[in-house]
Image (tube, rainbow, N blue to C red):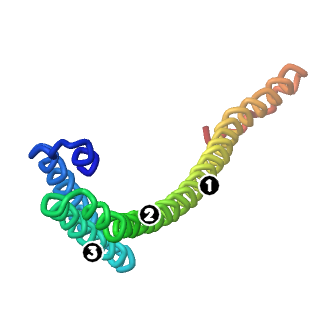
Amino acid sequence: ILVAFSSGNKPLDSDYLKIDQKTKRIKELMASLSKAMSDDQEQSILTNLIDQHRLFLSNYYDMLHELELNGLASAKELLVEQVEPSRLKLLAEGAHLLDQEKQRIQTRQIAAAQELEKLQQLIAAIFLLAILLGSFIAFKIWRSIVNPLAILEASAREIASGNYDNKVPPTKT
């Protein structure tokens, strides 16, 4: 808007409309963040951010009024003395909030990675147990088939060697 005035053009209503739309969108985002944040520290930071945003808007609108009432030189003075410092504080609060969110996300990622590692270990243990149990069952089934056959084979050899008195003992299978 200052650029438009410095070039001799008056800002259009659409310029003010864009500012109002952006302001509305920022307020919606902050309200959404406020609902999503459960931590008191995050709420405090967000409250500071909202306060800084209000201060910035107030200073910005004061500059616009000064621009329309007293001209470019007076508006530039307000820009330098009030608007820019409040904008920088607003950006600093926003960065602080983002840093807090980044730390919270990283903490959740670490916790999720640890949980995933525990789950992988549990799956590996279950897999190993399943292999051992399967091997044990296979061994038992193998013995229940092979042992009677071995006894039958031994009895058959006795009979083949001429010992007809040899009886094949009964088995469980």
Where residue 37 sits, quadrant-wise, is bottom left
- In this picture, residue 38 sits left or right of residue 146: left
**SS type, badge 1:** helix
Quarter of the C terminus within the rendering: top right
**75 and 24: which is toward the camera:** 75
Q: Residues within 10 Å of mark 3 (few under 14, many from 20)?
A: some
Pinpoint residue 19: horizontal percent, then vertical percent.
19, 52
Q: Residues within 10 Å of mark 1 (few under 14, many from 20)?
A: few
Question: What residue is disc 1 on?
Answer: 121
How far apart in space, not on screen, are marks 2 and 3 (Cα)? Answer: 15 Å
Residue at (74% x, 36% y) in the render: 147
Residue at (39% x, 63% y) in the render: 91
Pinpoint residue 95: horizontal percent, then vertical percent.
44, 63
How far apart in space, not on screen, are marks 1 and 2 (Cα)? Answer: 39 Å
**SS type, badge 3:** helix
> Which amino acid lies under the numbered mark 1 shown in the image of this protein?
Gln
- In this picture, residue 132 sits left or right of residue 24: right
How far apart in space, not on screen, are marks 1 and 3 (Cα)? Answer: 48 Å
- In this picture, residue 69 sits left or right of residue 130: left
Question: What residue is disc 2 on?
Answer: 95
Pinpoint residue 148: horizontal percent, then vertical percent.
71, 34
Q: Residues within 10 Å of mark 2 (few under 14, many from 20)?
A: few
> Which amino acid lies under the numbered mark 2 shown in the image of this protein?
Ala
